[in-house]
Image (cartoon, rainbow, N blue to C red):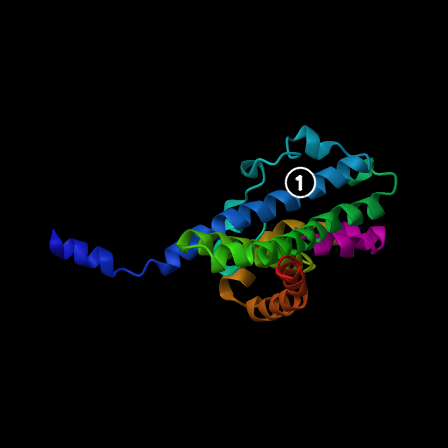
């Protein structure tokens, strides 16, 4: 029994703990991302997402299990796309582009909010807190980073990511119809790109750069409560 206890105590729990702590931020990011798509589509005249039960804060309605796993493991992933009928918009292409942009824009806003929270809570949690306080701070920081990475990843113009829908909106109807024929293969391409790391270096660099530029928000909040 003591041998088993020694093995158990000697295990490195850092990796599984970090993965577990990444699940909640990932769920927050993808839920608000997809909810934003549906809400904007509804505001523009398409109630398809509402009828499908996607105007909800329940993360289960938005989870793509592959995408969630990719997000937790590789920091880049996706959710189950919100159904949208672009022909219910007054201007189908423009409505589709605005609806597509709503997701990444919401993630940038989420990143800003959580960086602000990080700055506000840093002193009371880190300086005066214990291990649990550090976990809370780490979760807040992870949420900000994952949200920003989700925004940047979704700007990649590969279907079904939002960047592809924005790109399609500026194409001619003929070119749009041709590209839509290959939309079903987009998910296969995405999984290959993420799992092989073909684009992870570039995306990580861009995300890191953007995160660093946005960190002034945390510094502003920190100065706000400490002066």
Q: Residues within 10 Å of mark 1 (few under 14, many from 20)?
A: many
Say which residue appears at 73% left-offset and 48% top-offset.
102
In the picture, measured across the screen, residue 119 lies left or right of residue 46, that is left
The image quadrant that residue 222 belongs to is bottom right
Q: Taking 37 as reference, is 71 above or below it?
A: below
- Depth check, front residue: 122 or 168: 122
Q: Tell which residue pokes out farthest to the right in this image.
A: 90
Q: Tell which residue pokes out farthest to the front in this image.
A: 227
Measuring from the top left, give residue 100's x and y in whole percent: 73, 49
- How many numbered marks appear? 1
Q: Is residue 174 magenta?
A: yes
The image quadrant that residue 129 belongs to is bottom left
What is the quadrant of the C terminus in the image? bottom right
Measuring from the top left, give residue 148's x and y in whole percent: 63, 58
Measuring from the top left, give residue 179's x and y in whole percent: 73, 54
Which residue bears the numbered disc 1?
A: 35
Stretch of the chain drawn in magenta: 159-178
- Depth check, front residue: 10 or 128: 128
């Amino acid at each position: 029994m003591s041998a088993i206890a020694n093995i158990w105590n000697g295990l490195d729990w850092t990796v599984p703990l970090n993965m577990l702590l990444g699940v909640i931020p990932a769920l927050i990011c993808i839920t608000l991302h997809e909810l934003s798509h549906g809400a904007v589509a509804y505001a523009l005249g398409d109630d398809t997402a509402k009828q499908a039960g996607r105007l909800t804060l329940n993360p289960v309605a938005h989870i793509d299990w592959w995408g969630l796993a990719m997000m937790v493991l590789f920091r880049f992933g996706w959710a189950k796309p919100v159904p949208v009928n672009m022909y219910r918009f007054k201007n189908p292409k423009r409505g589709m582009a605005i609806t597509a942009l709503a997701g990444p824009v919401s993630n940038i806003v989420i990143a800003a909010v959580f960086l602000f929270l990080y700055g506000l809570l840093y002193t009371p949690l880190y300086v005066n807190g214990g291990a649990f306080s550090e976990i809370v701070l780490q979760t807040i920081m992870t949420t900000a980073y994952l949200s920003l990475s989700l925004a940047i990843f979704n700007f990649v113009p590969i279907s079904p990511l939002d960047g592809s829908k924005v790109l399609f909106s500026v194409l001619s109807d003929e070119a749009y119809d041709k590209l839509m024929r290959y939309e079903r293969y987009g998910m296969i391409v995405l999984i290959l790109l993420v799992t092989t790391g073909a684009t992870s270096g570039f995306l990580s660099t861009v995300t890191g750069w953007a995160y660093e530029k946005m960190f002034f928000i945390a510094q502003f909040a920190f100065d706000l409560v400490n002066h």
